[in-house]
Amino acid sequence: MPWKMRWNRRYALMGYIRGSLWIVPFFALLLYWVFSRIANAVGGWLIATGTIDETTAFYGVSMTGAQSLLGNVVTADLSFLVFTFGSLLVAIQVAGGQYTPRVIATTLLRDNTIRFVVGYLVFSWLFAARVSMRMGGETVEQFNIFIAGVLGLVSVVMFLYLIDYAARFLRPVSIVERVGQSGIAVIESVYPQPTTGARSTASSGRRASPDRTVFHVGRSGVVLAADLTGLAEQAGRANGMIEFVPQVGDFLAVDEPLFRLYGGANAIDDDTLRAAVALGTERTTDQDPTFALRILVDVAIKALSPAINDPTTAVVAIDQLHRLLRRVGLRDLRDENIRDQAGEVRIVYRTPNWEDFVYLACTEIRHCGASSVQIMRRMRSMLENLVQTLPPHRHAELRQQLELLERTVQKSYTFPEDISLARIPDPQGLGGSLGVQPVSEG
């Protein structure tokens, strides 16, 4: 039987590749190895056909000029690489301290633009260094010198682009927009069906007690993802049902229940079941629909802390929370069963419900931003807009949050004018003219 990598190990490997900066430079090394040989072959063919005559310096580059050019390219590329990695370390420290450490793995280290620019600089540096080492005697490799010069010129352009890109990328609006986009993707993946408002009455088929319980062994960790499709196929072949006990994003300690098995699923091997669950040290947005909201809330409450005191950044985070809550409110959040083609329930697993999303998005920001008029106005604008745009069965939790917001305003402000101002919904936080009346003169 051919060897097959376990699902959780394959998931961990793919996650490591997506979040590792050194992978693209490594492939740049392989590309350099292939490209340098092709360039040598093409250069030799051009000499053999008489297109290039090395003794007359077809490209106008003498030995001294070639050595100077190659030295400049090697030095520039190496300087660009050192500066890029140094700046990246500073950016990681700033992002972790100014926003939240959770944006490092989910946003910074997964950015392909930074990785590909670094990979190109490594490629250009290696090629120029190799051509420089091959220079000797009176031979000037005109074709390779030309390629190295072009690569060096492009390196300057790429480095300047990277500086501009990084400056734009590290702005709060760019960070939270990327987090919001990843949240949209996972919400649509976990909740593929639009909401109908009708309560699901179908039974999951679970009995009062399972036939067998599978416990977690090995190392404790956070549940990152589960191979629900593979588990459903196993349950179908065994003609049984599998209940996945933890929720994605939960911390799972050793000896805690991992699966409850019903019917024919009782015969499935424990190791096979455990291989369908990936654990790690930090949550990801792959199958965790609330983690994007968790990051945005962390950015908002960090901005509202006395040490930073930047409520406008918190308003930018609330903009993305508004976007995610509206998308969640339009999805069907109640079906936690995976069925086979015959309609039989094969997998039962827990996912966050509407109340979980609303409380996560509102509670901590309301507490930390109680003294900020901006936050009170922006939160009211978000909640009232969601009441107007989402189906009626989503309104109860939203109206409860509006009531809590009103009580927070009453408690936090003394002057009637401040209370009136904080009650006005404003999508800009503070600055929009909605509902604001000028003070009469005289």
Image (cartoon, rainbow, N blue to C red):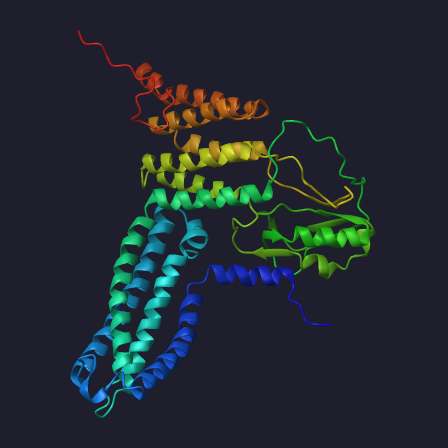
Q: Residue at x 41, y 56 (%)?
A: 111
Q: Quadrant of the N terminus?
A: bottom right
Q: Quadrant of the C terminus?
A: top left
Q: Residue at the bottom extreme?
A: 137
- Residue 19: x, y in percent? 46, 59
**Does residue 359 appear anywhere in the picture?**
no
Q: Is residue 310 above or below residue 389?
A: below
Is residue 94 toward the left or the right of residue 242 in the image?
left
The residue lying toward the viewer, choosing from 66 and 377, is 66
Q: Is residue 360 above or below residue 129?
A: above
Q: Residue at the top extreme?
A: 442
Q: Residue at x 31, y 53 (%)?
A: 165
Q: Residue at x 53, y 26 (%)?
A: 390
Q: Is residue 98 above or below residue 397?
A: below
Is residue 141 toward the left or the right of residue 263 in the image?
left
In the picture, residue 149 is in which quadrant?
Answer: bottom left
Is residue 331 toward the left or the right of residue 87 in the image?
right
Callout count? 0
Q: Residue at x 80, y 43 (%)?
A: 209
The residue lying toward the viewer, choosing from 27 and 306, is 27
Q: Is residue 66 above or below residue 320?
A: below
- Residue 83: x, y in percent? 27, 64
The residue lying toward the viewer, choosing from 58 and 67, is 58
- Residue 428: x, y in percent? 34, 29
In the picture, residue 66 is in which quadrant?
Answer: bottom left
**Does residue 108 appear anywhere in the picture?**
yes
